[in-house]
Amino acid sequence: VQLQASGGGLVQAGGYLTLSCAASGTFYRINDMAWFRQAPGKQRELVAIIARGNTTNYAQYAKGRFTISRDNAKNTVNLQMNSLKPEDTAVYYCNASVLRALLSSEDPYWGQGTQVTVSS
């Protein structure tokens, strides 16, 4: 299973970016999908998570500014980020909880990370 993230870049404060992540490979089903981020010198933290049934949860700083969505048919997850702030600068990672077979355990998979830089 591979996760390929894209969409990062440099944007001015107040701007927007959309991150995308596509899962590929052989598996039975993807359950939760999520975006994490890691700023320099800080621990990786959860930004937003979306269940297969589209229930979502956001970090407090992301509420009202970020929107996570997914397409189960395409095995993709997006993160729309609006009103970006310099403190949103980080490497963003997509994450998926994958069932490789019907009766297998759920395993986490990570994308390679995409840099988001917000200038003031």
Image (spheres, helix red, strand yellow):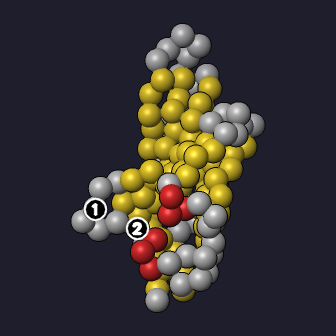
Tell me what residue is drawn at x 50 percent, y 63 percent. 61
Label annotation for residue 96: none
Tell me what residue is drawn at x 62 percent, y 26 percent. 29
Q: Position of residue 53 (x, y in %)?
A: 71, 33
Q: Amino acid type of disc 2?
A: Ala
Q: Secondary structure at mark 1?
A: loop
Tell me what residue is drawn at x 59 percent, y 13 percent. 102
Q: Position of residue 97 (x, y in %)?
A: 51, 33
Left or right of 114? Residue 66 is right
Tell me what residue is drawn at x 44 percent, y 28 percent. 107
Q: Amino acid type of disc 1?
A: Lys
Q: Which residue is under mark 2? A: 90
Q: Position of residue 63 (x, y in %)?
A: 59, 60
Q: Report, in whole angstroms, how far the alpha carbon at label 2 lies from the one at label 1.
A: 10 Å
Q: Position of residue 18 (x, y in %)?
A: 63, 65
Give residue 65's quadrant in the image. Answer: bottom right
Count of all numbered marks drawn on residues in the image: 2
| In the depicted structure, whether residue 107 falls above or below residue 13 | above
In this rendered view, identify the residue nearer to me: 53 or 95: 53
Q: Which residue is under mark 1? A: 42
Give residue 101's quadrant in the image. Answer: top right
